[in-house]
Image: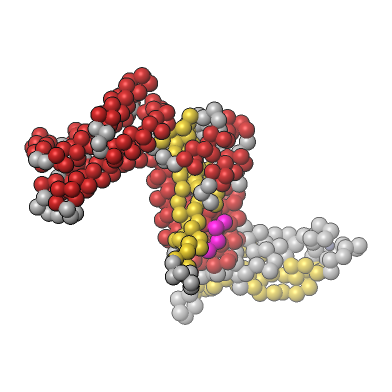
Amino acid sequence: MLFGMDGVEVTEAEREADGRLTVWARITVPPVCPGCSSVSEKVHQYVTTRPRDVRACGQDIGLFLVKRRMECAGEDCATVTFTEPAPQVPPRCTITRRLLDHAAAEVTDRGITPAEAARDAGISWPSVHGAFRQAADQVLDESPAPVAHLGIDEHRRGRPRWRQDSDTGEYVQLADRWHVCFYDLGGNQGLLGQVEGRTADDTAYWLAGATPAWRDAVQVVAIDMCTIFASAVRRMLPHAAIAVDLFHVVQLAVKTVGDVRRRATREIYGRRGKAGDPEYGIKHLLNRNLENLSPEQFEKIIEALDASAEGQQAAIAWIAKEKLRDALNLRARVTGSTPCERQVRDRLFTFYDWCAQHEDIPELATLANTIARWENEIVTAVLTGVTNATAESLNRLAKLEARHAYGFRNPANQRRRVRIACTRGTRRPSAPTTSTTRRVNKQKRHHG
Ligand SMILES: [Zn+2]
């Protein structure tokens, strides 16, 4: 009973001199012929097998399983002899089913690599990977439930490969492979799917594979400011609104402030900034949000930037960033109330107006142009509050998985492992092998 293997009965168990536990067992399932389904009584031969089994109480078990080879009693049956069937140890298997299930669960639920699970279970990598693949494909083959808010992001597969051209000496890129990932932002389905490549066609290809009903259910798609994804979404999900991730919008504005400050420094000193320059001393303060600055820090910024005409340019860029943030801060998460579209567009207009007043700063014109090109998508993001934050955090998991594996050679395996990792939180962990034993015991106690 303690051994807990279905259809197997322990006949003897003893501790060896070296402390190892040896278990002798035999099969109790009626020997049914696979050819004619009749139960045979005639034993042809006894065979002792040594299948590899799970550890018990942290120690390896030496399992000797005696199987009988039966002669078929059926009159017109083509089968002459057959081995007794055991649900946990099918014919020609040297690893018990429960050990494989345990190793597969270690990979799917606990997130260790098949190599580590194989080392731990004392079996080979192909065995563990095969079991993992079987378990994972069962979960992943289910088509995703409808998603209202869809996120799209990409991550690099491996690193780009270069080759030096023998004639010119220049480096030519050989391979730069990417995976585009689709995420459920509103629900808890995690990573919905991946596709290799990063073109609009690749992205549209995955969306085309979904059912029309699933595509119709998508209301908002969150993307980075990336024209490739935008065009794929417009092609395949024409009714869905696109929201750009506001984090990347602010990031772009912060970068612009830095660009203006660096150019201004070069114009004043004819070199790049260094410690001691007043503008250099405030470079981190310029990255901060206005509401997070103390009055002294604000004073310091104004003082440093007021000193020269070039410094004033950096100040103007910084104010432009804050004006852009004013528009983005209308979102319900910040204000607590749903904004109206007019308000958002008005504040964006104030930002454009500020940039237009200072057309002598080329970086600001570029920023305003980019924002204008994505205006509708920014307004959608502010109004709906949909962000790609979930996608970014799951993307981090995807990269971590590749690092655990020391890189993947097989893209299909990578997609399988990444999807299992990114849906782990929503799956119920599969029951550990010991619980079956407990349930059987309880039933037996009730009956007896
Ligand atoms: Zn038969």
- In the image, which residues are magenta? 408-412
Q: Position of residue 323 (x, y in %)?
A: 25, 30
- Left or right of residue 57: residue 296: left
Could you say which is closer to the camera, residue 29 or residue 180? 180
Residue 21 in magenta?
Answer: no
Tell me the chief SS of the magenta region.
loop
- Left or right of residue 88: residue 254: left
Q: Position of residue 340 (x, y in %)?
A: 36, 19
Could you say which is closer to the camera, residue 70 or residue 146? 146
Q: Position of residue 210 (x, y in %)?
A: 61, 39
Ligand 1 located in image quadrant = bottom right
User: Residue placed at 72% from the left, 74% from the top?
Assistant: 46
- Left or right of residue 286: residue 348: right
User: Residue placed at 44% from the left, 41% from the top?
Assistant: 226
Is residue 120 among what the camera can see? no
Is residue 168 among what the camera can see? yes
- The mark tally for this picture is 0
Q: Is residue 414 above or below residue 304?
A: below
